[in-house]
Amino acid sequence: MTSPTYYHGTRADLCPGDLIAPGRRSNYGSRRVARFVYLTETLDAAIWGAELAMGEGRARIYIVAPRGPIEDDPNLTDKRFAGNPTRSYRSADPLLVVGEVATWQGHSAEALATMRAHLEALRAQGVEAIEQ
């Protein structure tokens, strides 16, 4: 059986061999120090991560390998999408960057605006965009 391919969307400029580790400011919400790093098996979820990440850099999607155990991402699983159909996970251990997805299609400007408005509405209600 082959291992799944995992992705991480961000605006950070990384290279194969770099580690994405907890303990840095989150790319989302109030930018608290993150206790977890996030990864997904779906390119669409990684695209959302890259497009919605804060920062000035170009949106990027990296192929990553977890360096420790992973668990379902509680920000999505059973809170928004029962059963984890987005195949989104988190880990308290670093992710190793093994490559970059060079070509991918982002969401439409309308879809991005709708998602940003939804996230802003959650923020106004005091809901953090990401569980640290």
Image (cartoon, grey):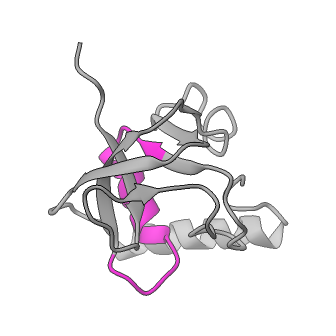
Q: Is residue 49 magenta?
A: yes
The residue located at (29%, 55%) in the rendering is: 17
- Pick out the residue farthest to the left: 103
Q: Say which of 94 and 82 sits in front.
A: 94
Q: In which quarter of the image is residue 82?
A: top right
Q: Give the extent of the magenta segment.
A: 39-58
Picture coordinates of residue 112, whole percent (x, y): 44, 70
Tell me the quarter of the image containing the N terminus.
top left
Residue 48 visible in the picture: no
Picture coordinates of residue 59, whole percent (x, y): 34, 73
Q: Say which of 56 and 92 sits in front.
A: 92
Q: Is residue 40 magenta?
A: yes
The residue located at (61%, 43%) in the rendering is: 92
Residue 119 visible in the picture: yes
The residue located at (49%, 39%) in the rendering is: 88
- Pick out the residue farthest to the front: 17
Q: Quadrant of residue 127?
A: bottom right
Seen in the picture, residue 122 relative to 12 is either above or below; the reply is above
Seen in the picture, residue 58 relative to 65 is either above or below; the reply is below
Picture coordinates of residue 63, whole percent (x, y): 28, 49
* Left or right: residue 60 compared with residue 68: left
Q: In which quarter of the image is residue 123?
A: bottom right
Picture coordinates of residue 118, whole percent (x, y): 63, 65
- Pick out the residue farthest to the top: 1
Tell me the quarter of the image containing the C terminus.
bottom right
The residue located at (49%, 75%) in the rendering is: 113
